[in-house]
Amino acid sequence: MWVWSSREVGLTDTTQVRAWLSLGSNQLPRRYLPSAIDDLRADFGNLIISPVYESEAVGFAGENFLNLVVGIHTDLTPQAVNRQLKAIENRHGRVRNENKFAARTLDIDLLTYGDQIIERDGIRLPRDEILRYAFVLLPLSEVAGEEIHPEEGKSYRQLWQGFDRSGQALWPVALELQKDR
């Protein structure tokens, strides 16, 4: 288990960690996702950007989502990264309510933080969504295929190869995102 730093803004040894983020939108996604990428680039520098996939809404009837995975390098704590991600969501008109499954302008979730297993202050990493949703695991397997899931002990590529895709249709879509990689 990772020991939390007493410094709220960063790690004690200033070592950069690669973190993976999941981005999704079903309200004007062709507007909000490129704008979110610009904000992430401003906050974290160079990004690793997966292909974009479209999928049906999960858990509610609504417009299809566009989803992708983005890799960042950071010396911030997971808690500080999470705050930055919520601020970006808020700037993009994210409305929060008690219903987890709802339409949204922008959803950004911290999926992993290096190879850390973290459960503290409302943060659980790696996120369960990696193993549950094709729209998270497929793009993650494409940009971090050889990285190992810290709890499963398998690479993201292996996890995707063994994933039951029968109930989760998704398909690639073209979305202009300026790529760093």
Image (cartoon, grey):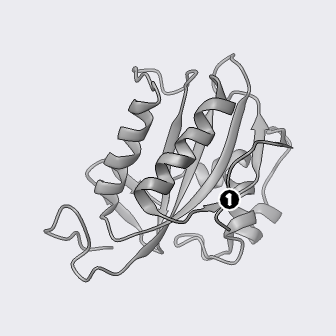
Please give left or right for residue 83 compared with residue 88 in the image.
left
Residue 133 in view in this figure: no
Instruction: Please identify the quadrant where the N terminus is shown.
Output: bottom left
Q: Position of residue 126 (x, y in %)?
A: 49, 61
Question: Where, by quadrant of the figure, is residue 146 drawn?
Answer: bottom right
Which amino acid type is marked by label 1?
Lys
Q: Is residue 70 above or below residue 32?
A: below
Residue 14 in view in this figure: yes
Q: Position of residue 100 (x, y in %)?
A: 49, 27
Q: Secondary structure at mark 1?
A: loop
- The residue at the point 50 percent across, 43 percent down is 108
Question: Where, by quadrant of the figure, is residue 43 drawn?
Answer: bottom left
Q: Position of residue 88 (x, y in %)?
A: 42, 40
- The residue at the point 83 percent across, 43 percent down is 174
Q: Is residue 1 above or below residue 40?
A: below
Instruction: Please identify the quadrant where the C terminus is shown.
Output: bottom right
Q: Position of residue 112 (x, y in %)?
A: 49, 62
Residue sitting nearer the eye, 170 or 165: 170
